[in-house]
Image: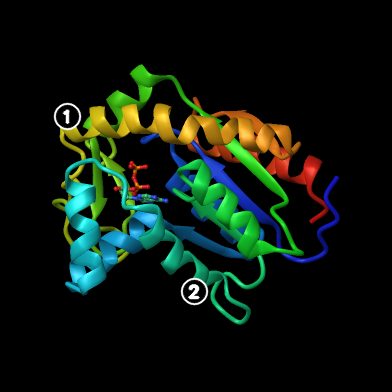
Amino acid sequence: MANCSKPPRLVLLGKQGAGKGTQAKRLADHYTTVHLSTGDMFRAQAAQGTAFGLEARRYMDAGDLVPDEIVMGVIEECLAPGGPLGDGFVLDGFPRTVPQAVDLDRVLGARPLDLVIDLEVPREIVLDRIAGRRVCVSCQTVYHINMPPSHNWTCDKCGNEVRQRDDDTEEAVERRLQLYERETVPIMDYYRERGLLVVVDGVGEGDEVFERLVKVVNDHVQV
Ligand code: ADP
């Protein structure tokens, strides 16, 4: 068991549509720590029209990965002592390639990750979830066509527009799932070899999945 008197340092892995974003937010609240989604961060930068955001958007809209060196530059800033991730965190969407995982270990140095969770959901289910997924353009809260916000596709939390993500088209999703198999699945072996990986069943009601996640964190990390 990792000795972790501070907030835990967690990574959530899982296919597109596995529910990482929703569950990572809940875990971060539960352990009073910070949720970082690289996808949300890149989308927010793109919406603000920053040079970095516009560059990231070119890759995202095509369903490609943003190059490692660009991603690592941003992450390193966040993880610097005194930065937003200086203490504990729940990472969602990062690392996504083995070089990113290796680099993350280097940056974390003396206080490594406590646990890496693979949120496992079969392909047919994620395809169905993504086809119906609708997201708030501002706070990124996720809805589904079967579970819309209460008023006319405006976000229940912040009142902004809720719509389909630009990269949730069938072609981009297919490409992202292929990239996930090729680039991200090898990360599981990397973490398994280091004794850090646990697999959690991500099928079921959100509350049920959340309880499973909290149980594995409490079982493996001293929080
Ligand atoms: P999804 O997991 O459904 O693809 P995300 O919101 O996590 O959604 O990411 C959206 C897009 O942002 C990705 O398709 C990719 O282009 C880019 N991205 C996010 N995180 C990373 C990362 N760690 N490395 C490279 N690209 C990333």
- Label 2 residue SS: helix
Please name the colour scheme applied to the rendered image: rainbow
Q: Nearer the viewer, residue 175 or 139?
A: 175
Q: Residues within 10 Å of mark 2 (few under 14, many from 20)?
A: some
Q: Earlier in the sequence, mark 2 or mark 1?
A: 2
Quarter of the image with the C terminus in it? bottom right
Question: Where is residue 128, by image quadrant?
Answer: top left
> How far across and down, in percent of the image, does residue 156 sit?
29, 58
Q: Secondary structure at mark 1?
A: helix
Horizontal and vertical percent position of residue 71 = 40, 59
Q: Give residue 170's mark.
A: 1
- Label 1 is placed on what type of residue? Glu
Point 31% across, 61% down: residue: 42
Q: Is residue 73 left or right of residue 131?
A: right
Q: Is mark 2 within 8 Å of ligand 1?
A: no
Classify 10 Å Cα crowding around label 1: few (below 14), some (14-19), many (20 and above): few
Q: Quadrant of residue 55?
A: bottom left
Spot occupied by residue 60 in the image (x, y as percentages of width and height): 23, 49
Q: Which is closer to the viewer, label 2 or label 1?
A: 2
Q: Are marks 2 and 1 in contact (CB under 8 Å)?
A: no
Q: Nearer the viewer, residue 69 or 114?
A: 69
Q: Position of residue 46 (x, y in %)?
A: 21, 65
Indicate which disc residue 157 carries: none
Question: Could you tell me if residue 15 is visible in this image?
Answer: yes
Residue topped by disc 2: 77
Residue 9 or 60: which is nearer the viewer? Answer: 60
Q: Is residue 149 visible?
A: no
Q: Who's the residue at 16% across and 30% down the image?
A: 171
Horizontal arrangement in the rendering, residue 183 relative to residue 84 (left or right) = left
- The amino acid sitting under disc 2 is Glu
Inter-mark Cα distance, 2 to 1:
34 Å
Residue at screen point 39% across, 32% down: 180
